[in-house]
Amino acid sequence: MLTLIGKRLLFAIPSLIGVVIVTFLLTRALPGDPAAYFAGPAATKEAVDQIRKKLGFDKPLIEQFVRYSNDLAHGDLGTSLTTGQPVAAELRNRLPASAELTLLGLVVSIVIAIPLGVLAATRPGSWIDHLCRVTTTAGVSLPVFFTGLVLVYVFYFRLGWAPAPLGRLDVFYSAPPTITGFYLIDTLIAHDFEAFRSALSQLILPAVTLAIFSLAPIARMTRASMLAVLASDFVRTARASGLSPGKVIVTYAFRNAMLPVITTLSMVFSFLLGANVLVEKVFAWPGIGSYAVEALIASDFAPVQGFVLTMAIMYVALNLLIDILYGVIDPRVRLEG
């Protein structure tokens, strides 16, 4: 298993280097001039050139890249021109908000999608099978920002059940002392149950939005994988041996059907990282997605590059976790490693 993990880490290094190079080139190819943006519309050409020289954008592209790579090697992601703060500090402060939202949305979708897929596979043609198909079709068809706007309109504007979509806490509550950065955990540690209720109520709609978006591929893959395993020879042998249907499904079928589902989870998580940007804008969520969008509008390169690099590292870490889960579920993976 350690050999397998070591190989995956070695393969991840070229990927991260490629992400750094591509992100640097793409940000430089974007329309807009940061120097002109920060100089203002009334600035003269000399003033714009002076700001460009101060920012280092007058240097050749290769020299800019060498300087950027050297800063990365020392853990420096640069400074945001918009806020004047170090990008690493901004991402560190905002990452828990995005992680809490993304993980809760993924957990909600798993809790709904996997049982739904299993029940649909064990009862083909039933009403729950049709419900699974309708749910997966709707989840794939609806854009995530549209789903979020509909939920806000129905549950906040029309029914008044949900709080205003304006961040992680209601305006009447203060943020808990930062321990993990996850408000649901930090409020419980601080025994501030009113703030916990407020943080949970603010999380429900954006998390449900992400869950609706992500449960479709999980439920569909669970159903297809369970159908394939239930039709296999070893499951028929287990049934012929007189084992109970529950034992056959849980012990034999479900575990063998989980490998494709785990692969789907890694892809779904990457989809959520992209969808999270739109959800954060709809719900005014102070995460790294909204931070990157604001920087992109202002042609602020450093936050965008830091955001993409952070997403790449998270994706590599997730794939490593998936490989470890493979080894836990299927011993053949450890032997191959």
Image: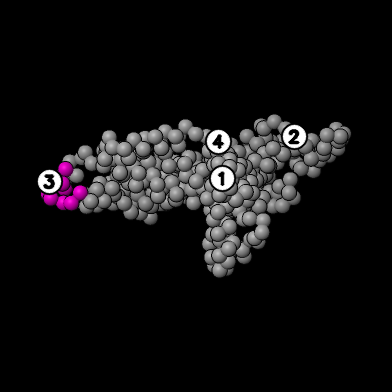
From this viewpoint, is residue 228 visible? yes
Mark nearer the N terminus (1 vs 2): 2
Mark nearer the N terminus (3 vs 2): 2
Q: Magenta segment, which residues?
A: 236-245
Q: Secondary structure at mark 3?
A: helix
Q: Which residue is denoted by mark 4 in the rendering? A: 146
Foreground of the two, 205 or 184 = 205
Horizontal and vertical percent for residue 125? 27, 35
- The total number of labels drawn is 4
Question: Tag 4: residue type?
Answer: Phe
From this viewpoint, is residue 269 visible? no
| C-alpha distance separating marks 4 and 3 | 49 Å
Q: Which residue is denoted by mark 3 in the rendering? A: 240
**Taking 104 as reference, is 173 left or right?**
right
**Badge nearest the viewer, 1 or 3:** 1
User: For the N terminus, which image quadrant?
Assistant: bottom left
| C-alpha distance separating marks 3 and 2 | 71 Å
Mark nearer the N terminus (4 vs 3): 4
Q: How many residues crowd mark 1 within 10 Å: few (<14), some (14–19), many (20+)? A: few
Magenta stretch holds residue 239: yes
Question: Tag 1: residue type?
Answer: Leu
Q: How many residues crowd mark 3 within 10 Å: few (<14), some (14–19), many (20+)? A: few
Mark nearer the N terminus (1 vs 3): 1
